[in-house]
Image: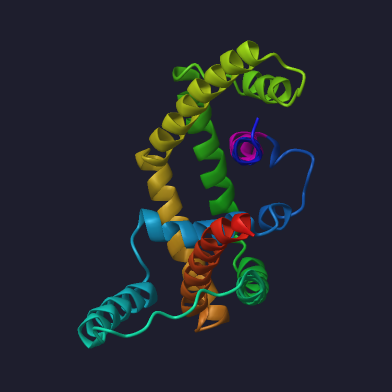
Amino acid sequence: MSPPMAKTFAGVLFSANQGARMFHHDRTPLYARTGGLLILAFLLGSLLVFGSTPALAQDSESSAAEKAGNSTELKKFEPAEPEPSVAEERQSIAKLQERVEKLEQKLATIRDKAMDNNPELETKLKDLVMTRNEALQNNLKDSNVDMERLKELQKNLENEDLKQAERKKLEKEFKDMFLGYKQAEMKTNRNETVRNLRKDFYDDLLKAFKEENPEAEKLISELSRLKHQLRYAKDEAMPQQNKK
């Protein structure tokens, strides 16, 4: 199995199984046990589900206006800038990564304070995760997706001695079942109860963030923007690095 597929599958297993394990034999607060990733995912992911935050919307409008203005000011015979070297690209990516990490740390501190000062958020998050997990498990069952079989397929595909014909057969089975998982996940995310719980939690969480730091929404928007830039920079750097 290729590394990207293995990485994707690892994420699938975490998403599908975390709810079942999350609240057993562990009294540590949920947000601490998930490393805060789930909460930041709600804040960043909400941009896709509920639309952009005001700060992001304003950034998008400014960006669109800036692009429109730049397009009219381009000089017809302006010489192209030289492509950056691999070393320069790596340095640029490293700086972006550093900015992302610092923002994540800052937001993590705000998150911890917000959750500590608003214990009802822990209950809402627990209800959301458990409700979503139950809906997902039902949808996986309806789609005939067996997560244990997916684990087995992954293990088998990691065998380098696997014959080509058998590998193709297993890859097809994996891809078909993975597609079933994604369809079940999309159906779960469209579930009205899940959406309402998610929006309710997100609204209260963002409010709690703002109470701890009035600039929280701006920081979240900046983190989202930098993550997109970092992903784009890495994608752009790969072809050039492969040429070297």
Q: Determine if the magenta segment contains residue 75.
A: no
Image quadrant assignment for residue 20: top right
Q: Quadrant of the N terminus?
A: top right
In the image, residue 125 sits, relative to residue 110, either above or below, namely above
Seen from the viewer's position, the closer of residues 27 and 227 is 227
Residue drawn at point x = 79 percent, y = 39 percent = 25
Q: Determine if the magenta segment contains residue 12.
A: yes
Task: Report whether 130 appears left or right of 101.
Answer: left
Seen from the viewer's position, the closer of residues 71 and 241 is 241
In the image, residue 161 sits, relative to residue 230, either above or below, namely above
Outermost residue, left side: 72
Residue drawn at point x = 53 percent, y = 58 percent = 235
Q: Give the tally of numbered discs.
A: 0
Magenta region:
10-20
Image quadrant assignment for residue 105: bottom right
Residue drawn at point x = 57 percent, y = 63 percent = 237
Image quadrant assignment for residue 51: bottom left
Seen from the viewer's position, the closer of residues 78 and 24 is 78
Residue 207: horizontal and vertical position, in percent?
47, 72
Residue drawn at point x = 73 percent, y = 52 percent = 33
Residue 23: horizontal and vertical position, in percent?
69, 41
Magenta stretch, main secondary structure, is helix
In the image, residue 225 sits, relative to residue 170, either above or below, namely below
Residue 80: horizontal and vertical position, in percent?
39, 79
Seen from the viewer's position, the closer of residues 52 and 30 is 52
Residue 145: horizontal and vertical position, in percent?
53, 20
